[in-house]
Amino acid sequence: MDAEEFKNRLLPLKNKLYRLALRLTANRQEAEDVVQDVYLKIWSMRNQLEKYRSIEAFMLTMTRNLCLDKLKLKKNKAVSLVPEINRSSEHNPQQLTEQKDMVKRVLHIMEQLPQQQKTIIQLRDIEAFSFEEMIEITGFDKNYLRVNLSRARKKIRETIEKLQQHELQ
């Protein structure tokens, strides 16, 4: 793989890698470092990449593994990434505020999930990967992914319901 092919095929994946790294490390600087490390490793092994069925899945797996290594070395305090809410004209300011608040709550709850569940829900619900892609990235089997995705969603739902009940009282 030459530099031009590398630039055209692999550099467009940087945002996806960054989002995954940011979600796992909860630190912008570390996420950037992880993505840079992934690209350096991929460049150094550019001549062996044809043996991988999906380079994207391989890079996502590398990103995940590097993030987990960083987390094992240093326990981080999570910093939420709040995505922008759709600001279409059909929403009034109160609805926008409520949506932003709900997104912050869900992301905060996600940060409290076990690492594997956090990774699985990030890949499935935020990055919209198929189960087949998730199997390739994580190495987990389909039933394990489904069970943990279900548990993570249930935990988020129950926590939100408890918070809403508490607010009504």
Image: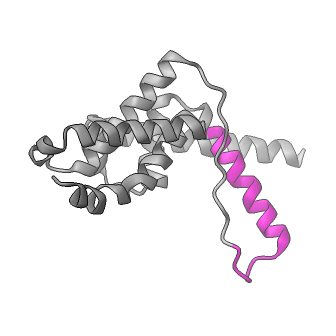
In the rendered view, does 75 fall on the left or right side of 140? right
In the rendered view, does 15 fall on the left or right side of 168? left
In the rendered view, does 165 fall on the left or right side of 154? right
Q: Which residue is at the front of the view, 109 or 15?
A: 15
Q: Which residue is at the front of the view, 15 or 37?
A: 37
Residue that lies at the very extreme toward the right in this rendered image: 169
Residue 59, horizontal then vertical, whole percent: 30, 43
Most prominent secondary structure in the magenta stretch?
helix
Residue found 21% across the figure and 60% down from its top: 5
Q: Is residue 44 above or below residue 168?
A: above
Residue found 45% across the figure and 31% down from its top: 67
Q: Quadrant of residue 13?
A: bottom left
Region rendered in magenta: 87-109
The answer to whether residue 56 is magenta is no
Residue found 37% across the figure and 30% down from its top: 65
- Can residue 135 be seen from the camera position used here? no
